[in-house]
Amino acid sequence: MKNIVLTAMAASAVLVSCGTVQSLVQNTFPYTTNVLVSTGVPADKEVSSTATATNVQTWFGGNNNALIKDVRISDAKISVASPSGGNLSAFKTIKIYVSSSGTGERLIASRSNISTNSSSMSLDLNDTGFLDNIVKSSGLTVRTVYELKNQTSSDMNIKVALNFSSVPAK
């Protein structure tokens, strides 16, 4: 009985330490951008806004030899940056795409049938597989596509916050 208890305790310690080591070596790289939704944007029409992800390029340097692998989208959120007290009720759908020089565009996060009066919201992540070739290439571009239910009464700035995760390549 004593051996069973000691074995169980040792196995638990090993499992906990493996999880700790994995969380220490796993990296998360944030990316944020603002999207201007102006009062002239018509309802029920898809509108697109594109931004170059320079801060992600700073980490990876457009370097295919960067010592990371298994890059995935781990989190995607939108929130109202301005006006103060604004909410997302005007939005019908939102989609986030990534691409880079020489790669095709990939849908990484989206939300349809938005019905919230909140000022922020998590997006549904698309299982896009690994994004190594996109994130490690130069010229990473993030494109936000949205559709409104109705026109906004004032200009609105929406903050798009993405987190990419990776593990060391060696």
Image (spheres, grey):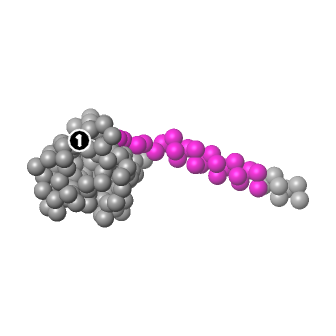
Magenta span has 56?
no
Magenta span has 9?
yes
- Tell me the residue that label 1 is attached to: 157
Whether 150 is drawn above or below 62: the answer is below
Whether 25 is drawn above or below 150: the answer is above
Residue 75 percent location from the top left of the image: 39, 50
Left of 83 or right of it: where is 169?
right
Image point (70%, 52%), residue name: 12
Name the foreground residue: 121 vs 30: 121
| Residue at the outermost front position | 153
Q: Secondary structure at mark 1?
A: strand
Image point (30%, 43%), residue name: 86
Neighbour class for label 1 at 10 Å: few (<14), some, many (≥20)?
Answer: some
Image point (89%, 59%), residue name: 1
Whether 99 is drawn above or below 168: the answer is below
Magenta residue span: 8-32
| Quarter assignment of residue 5 | bottom right
Residue 169 percent location from the top left of the image: 39, 47
| Quarter assignment of residue 97 | bottom left
Image point (36%, 52%), residue name: 117
